[in-house]
Image (cartoon, grey):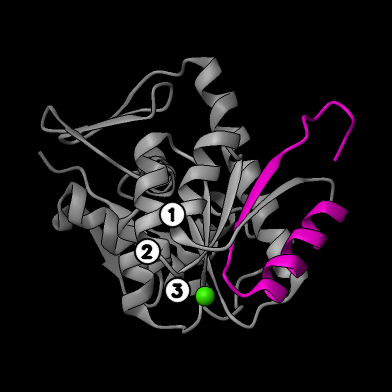
């Protein structure tokens, strides 16, 4: 981190104390302020009190689970969430995405991977804020209207609520509407994954988010080109 950057606050939510402590310790070493929570209800309380810049969230928690925590903290204010899942299981992933998680890691993960993902999430938020400050013009692709400044989306005039990742994905596809964008490129541009293409779950990350986005903007608007990637179609 450069000296001009504000100190970022990370909230680590994980009931296994050794994992929680290891995450907290590593993030502190990277310059973050870290808050810890060990169950669902206290995670929501701490999030409301400290307004973290990023949340690392285990799925299986006492009280109520990580999905419910995600739902509640996202309802209050958008914050990037990195979900920590025990199984590399698509159902987990999809349900997680439906509640507004931005990314996920399957256990066991390396601390290095966690740090890289958290940094990527924060870069995305900063990029989005910088873009919003420029007040760019809205993009129209068929019936879809995307305003990068306000981060609002409408389909046929009706507002659609997208998670931050879904919005970034739609914006990326819309900038080159009608063109097929490969998953590797989407991972680089939307997730800022750099060289992570080929890592476990990389393709599924893209596919899961596309699936969630389709459910919100209309499945027919996002065309799959098997083995290649996706394109946003200009449909009314
Ligand atoms: Ca757990």
Residue occupying the point 41% across, 38% down: 175
Dot 2, crowdedness within 10 Å: few (<14), some or many (≥20)? some
Q: Earlier in the sequence, mark 2 or mark 1?
A: 1
Q: What element does badge 3 sit on?
A: loop
Label 3 CB less than 8 angstroms from ligand 1: yes
Residue occupying the point 56% across, 27% down: 129
Q: Is residue 125 visible?
A: yes
Identify the mark at residue 60; answer none if there is no mark: 3
Q: Nearer the viewer, residue 102 or 59?
A: 59
Distance between mark 2 and mark 1 Cα atoms? 7 Å
Q: What element does badge 1 sit on?
A: helix
Rendering coords of residue 14 (x, y %): 58, 67
Residue occupying the point 66% across, 47% down: 10
Identify the residue position indicated by label 1 in the image: 41
Q: Nearer the viewer, mark 3 or mark 1?
A: 1
Q: Total of numbered circles in the picture?
A: 3
**Image side of residue 34 versus residue 71, left or right:** right
Does 96 appear above or below 221?
A: below
Q: Is residue 41 magenta?
A: no
Dot 1, crowdedness within 10 Å: few (<14), some or many (≥20)? some
| Quadrant assignment for the C terminus | top left
Rendering coords of residue 60 (x, y %): 45, 74
Dot 3, crowdedness within 10 Å: few (<14), some or many (≥20)? some
Residue 153: quadrant of the picture? top left
Q: Is residue 100 visible?
A: no
Label 1 CB less than 8 angstroms from ligand 1: no
Rendering coords of residue 5 (x, y %): 80, 30
Identify the mark at residue 64; answer none if there is no mark: 2
Q: Earlier in the sequence, mark 3 or mark 1?
A: 1
Question: What is the magenta range?
Answer: 1-29
Residue occupying the point 28% across, 66% down: 224
């Amino acid at each position: 981190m450069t000296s001009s950057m504000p100190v970022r606050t990370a909230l680590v939510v994980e009931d296994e104390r050794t994992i929680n402590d290891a995450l907290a310790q590593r993030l502190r070493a990277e310059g973050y302020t870290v808050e810890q929570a060990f169950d669902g209800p206290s995670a929501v309380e701490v999030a409301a009190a400290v307004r973290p810049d990023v949340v690392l969230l285990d799925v299986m928690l006492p009280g109520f689970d990580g999905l419910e925590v995600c739902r509640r903290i996202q309802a209050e204010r958008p914050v990037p969430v990195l979900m920590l899942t025990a199984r590399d299981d698509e159902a987990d992933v999809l349900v997680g995405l439906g509640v507004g998680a931005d990314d996920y890691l399957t256990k066991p993960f390396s601390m290095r991977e966690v740090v890289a993902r958290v940094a990527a999430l924060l870069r995305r938020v900063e990029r989005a804020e910088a873009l919003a400050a420029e007040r760019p013009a809205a993009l129209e692709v068929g019936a879809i209207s995307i305003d990068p400044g306000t981060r609002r989306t409408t389909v046929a005039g009706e507002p659609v609520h997208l998670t931050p990742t879904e919005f970034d994905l739609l914006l990326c596809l819309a900038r080159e509407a009608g063109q097929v964008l490969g998953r590797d490129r989407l991972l680089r541009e939307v997730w800022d994954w750099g060289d992570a293409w080929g890592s476990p779950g990389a393709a599924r990350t893209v596919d899961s988010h596309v699936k969630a986005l389709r459910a919100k903007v209309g499945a027919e608007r996002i065309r799959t080109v098997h083995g290649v990637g996706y394109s946003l179609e200009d449909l009314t």
